[in-house]
Amino acid sequence: MSEIKNLNPACIWKNFYALTQVPRPSGHLEKIQQFLLDFGKKAGVEVFKDSADNIVMRKPASPGMENKKGVILQAHMDMVPQKTPESTHNFETDPIQPWIDGEWVKAKGTTLGADNGLGVAAIMAVMEDKTLKHGPIEALITADEETGMFGANALPLGELNGDILMNLDSETWGKFVIGSAGGIDITATLDYKEVETDADDAAVKVTIKGLRGGHSGLEIHEGRGNANKLLVRLVREAIEECEARLAGWQGGNMRNAIPFKAEAVLTLPKENVTVLKELAADWLEDFQDEFKGIESGIEVICEDVETPKTEVPVEIQDNLIDAIYACHDGVVRMIPSYPDVVETSSNLAIINIGDGKASLKILARSSREDMKDYIVKTLESCFNMAGMKVETAGSYGGWDPNPDSEILHLLLKEYKDLFDKDGIIQVDHAGLECSIILGKYPHLDVVSLGPTMKSPHTTTERALIETVAPFWQLLKKTLEDIPEK
């Protein structure tokens, strides 16, 4: 693992490795905030934590470059905490275990945190490098981006002084993002009074796992299986064919991650247990055929468990199953003018049912406000018919593309000069903090870039080693050539 610190460029990889040793799951950022404060002091730059729990650093211009436009380098400090079923990792206390697998850096049993750790590591490299030539530089390292962009949403007005924002949270090297989707959290809840389980019934826990999961923005169009949506098909048929009753359901754990595992506890007459297990085996065959070429590790597991004392009432159970079945999940439509880019989608991310409470959590995204409103109302209508309370939170707007951006065209020129290739201009479906920051600082000229990463928000997250050195080379050259005010 320590070999990662010696990868090229060492200035980024050593900082990234240091970040992996500091717990930083969303919602638990005290350790990483202190780490960054200590780093800034050691690097000799101004550093502070603002009222939104963001970390801000300021580095003065190199001598003779004071008249350059100010650049804000921006990334987020938190990471998505996902782990494999067999992992005992505690994200609040344990370091990530990165390792080199050929051309990739991966993590053992967990998400890697390259999203957005490599961006933070690059900012750290800029802040501590005494040889770089540049104008005034600020760093904005935001809090809790992955769970609601809280740091960006609460960013104080008047705090930033720069003219250009370079977001370092993109995940395909050579592509320069100039627009992204907005998003909104949708939560449907229902309280119910549990009923007693038939004392003669057996109980079976049905688990669907082994799916790829993935980023609900970047990979929602790939047709990957959603464990909650697969499980509801099996559960509904078990209710219809095996006299099963729903006692509990847990699926998914992050709004912005496609759920790769879900499980439900079903009660049923003992004589129907064998039929349920045969039904589960049939569904496994169907799922494997349906997702051939997309999913290769699907598992459907039935385990005999102790019969719970209570379960969901029949009417409530049926309404919940209908709502889960009917809830839209996946792409709604593509952008008409960019037919390869998703415009609107929803991700049925988290389901928790049990102990008299039901909760369904969705992240909906769209690059159009009217279509975002459409998907919200679609989901509201679905859950209202099940008698559920629907609430929305964390809404943020899309980032409208500016193809005439000065920093974009500078980056494209530098990229062509350095690597003899044409950069690609891109609009992303994944949400970026740029739109929120632009809402507070509308004068900023904004672009997003980064080295290549695959499968963020999953335990197969990986960073392509060979893209980090040219990313660093481009970043240094661009900072040196930023135009004057």
Image (cartoon, rainbow, N blue to C red):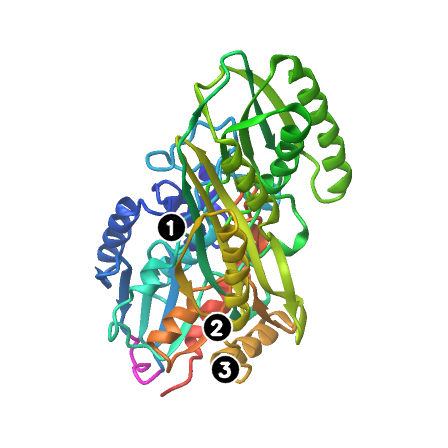
Mark 2 residue element:
loop
Spatial CA span between label 2 and label 3? 13 Å
Q: In the figure, is residue 482 to the left or right of 401?
A: left
**Residue 78: assigned label:** 1
> Residue 215: x, y in percent?
55, 51
Mark 1 residue element:
loop
Type of the residue with mark 1: Asp
Spatial CA span between label 1 and label 3? 29 Å
> Residue 353: x, y in percent?
46, 35
Can residue 229 be seen here? yes
Residue count near mark 3 (Cα–Cα under 10 Å), binned few <14, some 14–19, many ≥20: some
Type of the residue with mark 3: Ser
**Residue 405: assigned label:** 3
Residue count near mark 1 (Cα–Cα under 10 Å), binned few <14, some 14–19, many ≥20: many
> Residue 30: x, y in percent?
26, 46
Q: Which part of the image, by quadrant, shows the C terminus?
A: bottom left
